[in-house]
Image (tube, helix red, strand yellow):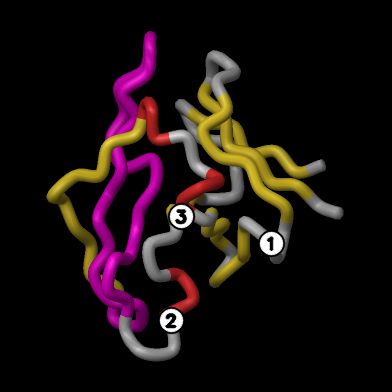
Amino acid sequence: MTTHTIQTHTGDVIATGILNQSVITVEGNWYFAPEAVDMTYLRVTERTYTCPYKGVCYWLDLDAPGAQVQNVGWVYQQPKPSFELIKDKIGFVPRSTACTQALTY
């Protein structure tokens, strides 16, 4: 089994899931089931991005002790047809960023 985890630079785990169970890969990004994400430090914003294929996503900001960062994740609440599998899942880039670490084990 392959497990994907997103954690803050301080080590707080904000998402963890088993590949093809609670996390899927779409277009190279990790999409976690909502129950696999700890929303304690995450906030869905009103800021959006419109993907011509998937539709409108809402950005998530990180507001953790020692780290306040915009656009660490995203969610498609009403994706376009053929992308329904990502509806309400929380997306993250599968690499480490300035405020998060992406781990696979």
Q: Is residue 42 above or below residue 83?
A: above
Q: Residue at x 72, y 52 (%)?
A: 18
Seen from the viewer's position, the closer of residues 26 and 12 is 12
In the rendered structure, find residue 21 and report the number of the disc placed on it. Answer: 1
Residue on which the image places disc 2: 83
Query: Magenta segment range?
Result: 52-79
Residue on which the image places disc 3: 91
Name the image quarter holding residue 53. Answer: bottom left
**Magenta stretch secondary structure, dominant:** strand
Q: Disc 2 or 1, which lies upstream in sequence? A: 1
Residue 41 is one of the magenta-drawn residues: no
Find the residue positioned furthest to the bottom: 81
Q: Amino acid at mark 3?
A: Gly
Q: Is residue 89 above or below residue 45?
A: below
Name the image quarter holding residue 5. Answer: top right
Q: Amino acid at mark 2?
A: Phe
Left or right placement of residue 65 versus residue 102 in this view? left
Q: Residue at x 61, y 65 (%)?
A: 25
CB contact under 8 Å: marks 3 and 1: no
Q: CA distance from mark 2 to mark 1?
A: 17 Å
Query: Residue 96 location, x and y as percent?
Result: 58, 36
Q: Amino acid at mark 1?
A: Gln
Q: Quadrant of the C terminus?
A: top right
Query: Please, what secondary structure does the residue beneath circle 2 have?
Result: loop
Q: CA distance from mark 3 to mark 1?
A: 15 Å
Q: CA distance from mark 2 to mark 3?
A: 13 Å
CB contact under 8 Å: marks 2 and 1: no
Find the residue positioned furthest to the top: 66
Q: Residue at x 34, y 30 (%)?
A: 62
Seen from the viewer's position, the closer of residues 79 and 66 is 79
